[in-house]
């Protein structure tokens, strides 16, 4: 930017020096002799040729910058649907006759689309900030995420997203309580339902109802960083049926 500004200033100064021209040895007189049509056409052709040469040299020197101006990725975050705003990833059959289906894990996925005209390379998502606010309290608890990239659904931390394509990534996961059976045939819960936001696995330290606000950032090699917030509200109660779980969980995105 500074170099371009310097060139413009030099050109303007040279123009005014040429107009004012206080030095007589630099002065010149225009020839008022009329020129023929052929000479006029020849001058026009010379000017056009010089202009085309200038354009060709400019394109050769700044080809990559010119292409980058018109060819670039454009990542957008798709808004989740109102219902359902989470998905059953795995499920198990409980009972033999009625075959009641119960989920073993729920998740909220982020859908990222590339609406640009070139691929977005080495796209990664990381959890930058995480806070928890308990209901009916003004105190906010802040946690320190690791900053490591989340894994996409192909278990990689960085991927390429082609033009007019989309990718999914899990950003919130809730696992069913871990249970064991006693010799007497009773079922005991070894571990409560587990909430994981991004790759932060210590959310269960806050067992009271409240709202989690997670700030994520999308990185890419050829795209500017994108920040977005996810608000998660969960009462801490596990429901094996999706219809019952809807009343316990809320998930919204803002960017």
Image (spheres, rainbow, N blue to C red):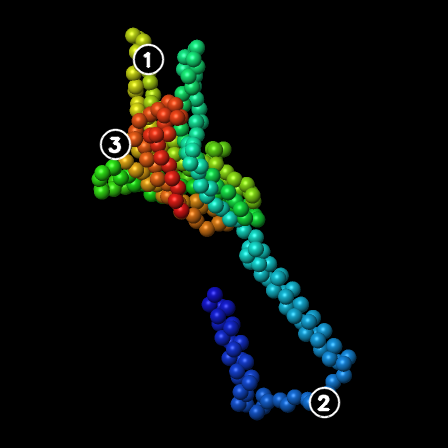
Q: Of callouts 3 and 1, which one flags the residue occurring earlier in the amino acid sequence?
A: 1
Which mark lies nearer to you, 3 or 2? 3
Q: CA distance from mark 3 to mark 2?
A: 95 Å
For disc 1, the marked residue is: 181
Tell me, for residue 33, which label it has, or none: 2
What percent of the width, then of the height, locates residue 249?
35, 32
Name the residue at 59% across, 89% down.
27
Q: CA distance from mark 1 to mark 2?
A: 110 Å
For disc 3, the marked residue is: 208
Q: Of callouts 3 and 2, which one flags the residue occurring earlier in the amino acid sequence?
A: 2
What percent of the width, then of the height, locates residue 144?
31, 41
Residue 158 appears anywhere in the view:
no
What percent of the width, then of the height, locates residue 228?
39, 45
Report crowding for label 2: few under 14, some 14 to 19, many 20 or more residues within 10 A (C-alpha). Answer: few
Q: Is residue 216 above or below residue 71?
A: above
Report crowding for label 3: few under 14, some 14 to 19, many 20 or more residues within 10 A (C-alpha). Answer: few
Left or right: residue 191 versus residue 161 is: left
Q: CA distance from mark 3 to mark 1?
A: 28 Å
Q: Is residue 9 above or below residue 147?
A: below
From the viewer's side, name the closer residue of 244 and 182: 244
Q: Of callouts 1 and 2, which one flags the residue occurring earlier in the amino acid sequence?
A: 2
């Amino acid at each position: 930017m500074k170099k371009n500004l310097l060139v413009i200033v030099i050109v303007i100064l040279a123009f005014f020096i040429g107009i004012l021209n206080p030095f007589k040895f630099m002065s010149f007189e225009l020839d008022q002799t009329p020129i023929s049509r052929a000479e006029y056409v020849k001058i026009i052709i010379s000017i056009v040729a010089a202009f085309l040469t200038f354009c060709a040299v400019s394109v050769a020197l700044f080809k990559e910058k010119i292409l980058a101006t018109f060819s670039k990725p454009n990542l957008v975050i798709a808004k989740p649907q109102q219902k359902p705003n989470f998905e059953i990833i795995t499920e198990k059959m409980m009972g033999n006759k009625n075959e009641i289906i119960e989920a073993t894990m729920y998740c909220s996925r982020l859908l990222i689309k590339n609406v640009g005209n070139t691929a977005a390379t080495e796209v990664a998502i990381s959890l930058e900030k995480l806070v928890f606010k308990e209901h009916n309290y003004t105190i906010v608890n802040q946690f320190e995420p690791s900053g490591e990239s989340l894994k996409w659904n192909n278990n990689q931390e960085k991927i390429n997203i082609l033009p007019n394509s989309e990718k999914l990534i899990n950003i919130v996961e809730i696992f069913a309580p871990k249970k064991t059976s006693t010799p007497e045939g009773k079922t005991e819960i070894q571990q409560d339902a587990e909430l994981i936001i991004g790759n932060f696995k210590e959310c269960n330290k806050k067992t009271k109802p409240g709202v989690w606000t997670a700030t994520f950032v999308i990185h890419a090699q050829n795209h500017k960083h994108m920040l977005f917030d996810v608000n998660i509200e969960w009462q801490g109660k596990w429901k094996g049926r999706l219809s019952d779980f809807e009343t316990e969980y809320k998930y919204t995105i803002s960017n």
